[in-house]
């Protein structure tokens, strides 16, 4: 711009340089004042008040101040007389309008950057809050280890100590591994193979208590072993199957856990003899929490459904088929 003005208006280079330096100084000072004025609205202010603060107050005031300063600097350095009747009003309003447009464009960019920054900050806060909520849910889940199950397991171990010490040692090992898996897991999701490991420890302890009344069959395709599942989800369904199904049947029955892959979807089915009426506990808070956790951790395309057919109750988990290691 300086070179263009020198060529078109035949102005000395040093004079044009001084003019551009004054213009640059006024622009820097004006944007600094405008930024301070916008920030004075506060980080919690609504965007409507921020825009009013910036465009209806800040820009006109800063443009006016910088226009006056520019003219004063011009008069001081140039020492030229100005026709008060014509040239000064025209120069004043023209310069004020130009600076208003300039500061308006700058303010638009600055406020937009503030909006992006605030949005990113809000998203980070939301994710941190969601993470804290999930961790709290997991801690609550760990704290809800069935005390009756622990009591029954300890009674079973006590009964085996004298008559079958080898089986008692085996039971203690399963119980310790189960508690370790339940209490030490800090992940919201874990591979299905790890979840099934916890389920097997639990079922081995229950088989010691129910003996021949409880039969277990687990059939999961190898391709599903790395599918991420919410921690303790299958475990909860297995506990419900034993508590509301096997334990209520005189002759017990078969508890089966099977997996299926159908295109982009995989299913885990926990089946046991019984009725949905007898398994009323499975329709309560436990199942509701399980569904909520599954939706949050896996997504809305997942589901848990209970069904009964021919005296067999099934709990079916459906999830996207993703072979990733958690």
Image (spheres, helix red, strand yellow):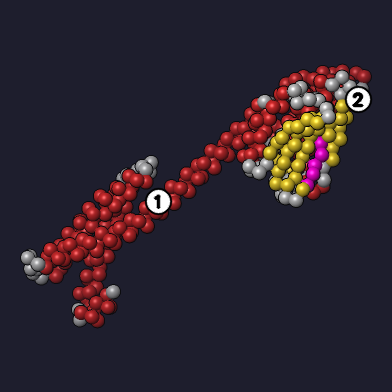
Q: Which residues are magenta?
A: 257-261
The percent position of residue 43, horizontal first and vertical second, equals 38, 43
For residue 319, which quarter of the picture? top right
- Residue at numbered disc 1: 114
The percent position of residue 302, horizontal first and vertical second, equals 68, 41
Q: Sort mark 2 into few (<14), some (14-19) or many (20+) by Cα contacts within 10 Å.
A: few
The percent position of residue 204, horizontal first and vertical second, equals 84, 30
* Quadrant the N terminus occupies: bottom left
- Residue 288 to residue 128: above or below: above
- Residue 66 to residue 207: above or below: below
Left/right placement of residue 27 relative to residue 166 reads left
For residue 64, which quarter of the picture? bottom left
- Residue 121 to residue 178: above or below: below
Lower sequence index among marks 1 and 2 = 1
Residue 101 seen in render? yes
The percent position of residue 196, horizontal first and vertical second, equals 79, 38
Mark 1 element type: helix
For image coordinates 79% across by 49% down, the residue present is: 223
Left/right placement of residue 101 relative to residue 188 reads left
- Residue 71 to residue 47: above or below: below
For image coordinates 10% across by 70% down, the residue present is: 80
- How far is mark 1 from mark 2, CA to CA? 68 Å
In front: 326, or 47? 47
- Residue at numbered disc 2: 212
Hey, which residue is sitting farthest right in the picture?
A: 163
In front: 183, or 250? 250
Hey, which residue is sitting farthest front in the picture?
A: 310
Q: How many marks?
A: 2
Q: Is residue 75 magenta?
A: no
Residue 157 seen in render? no
Left/right placement of residue 206 relative to residue 128 reads right
Q: Sort mark 1 into few (<14), some (14-19) or many (20+) by Cα contacts within 10 Å.
A: some
């Amino acid at each position: 711009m300086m070179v263009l003005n020198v060529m078109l208006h035949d102005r000395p280079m040093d004079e044009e340089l001084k003019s551009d330096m004054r213009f640059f100084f006024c622009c820097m000072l004006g944007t600094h004042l405008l930024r301070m004025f916008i920030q004075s609205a506060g980080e919690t202010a609504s965007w409507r008040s921020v825009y009013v603060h910036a465009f209806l107050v800040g820009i006109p005031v800063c443009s006016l101040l910088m226009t006056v300063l520019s003219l004063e600097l011009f008069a001081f350095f140039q020492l030229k007389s100005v026709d008060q009747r014509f040239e000064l009003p025209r120069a004043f309003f023209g310069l004020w309008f130009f600076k208003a447009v300039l500061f308006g464009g700058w303010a638009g960019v600055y406020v937009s950057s503030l909006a992006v920054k605030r949005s990113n900050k809000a998203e980070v806060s939301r994710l941190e809050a969601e993470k804290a909520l999930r961790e709290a849910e997991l801690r609550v889940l760990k704290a809800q280890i069935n005390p009756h199950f622990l009591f029954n397991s300890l009674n079973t171990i006590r009964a085996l100590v004298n008559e079958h010490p080898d089986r008692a040692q085996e039971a203690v090992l399963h119980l310790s591994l189960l508690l370790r898996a339940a209490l030490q897991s800090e992940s919201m999701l874990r591979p299905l193979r790890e979840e099934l490991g916890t389920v097997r420890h639990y079922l081995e302890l229950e088989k010691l208590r129910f003996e021949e009344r409880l039969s277990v069959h687990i059939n999961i395709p190898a391709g599903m072993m790395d599918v991420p599942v919410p921690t303790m989800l299958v475990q909860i369904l297995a506990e419900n199957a034993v508590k509301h199904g096997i334990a209520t049947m005189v002759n017990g029955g078969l508890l089966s856990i099977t997996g299926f892959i159908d295109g982009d979807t995989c299913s885990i089915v926990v089946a046991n003899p019984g009725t949905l009426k007898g398994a009323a506990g499975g329709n309560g808070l436990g199942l509701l929490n399980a569904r909520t956790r599954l939706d949050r951790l896996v997504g809305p395309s997942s589901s848990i459904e209970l069904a009964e057919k021919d005296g067999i109750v099934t709990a079916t988990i459906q999830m996207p088929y993703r072979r990733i290691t958690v």
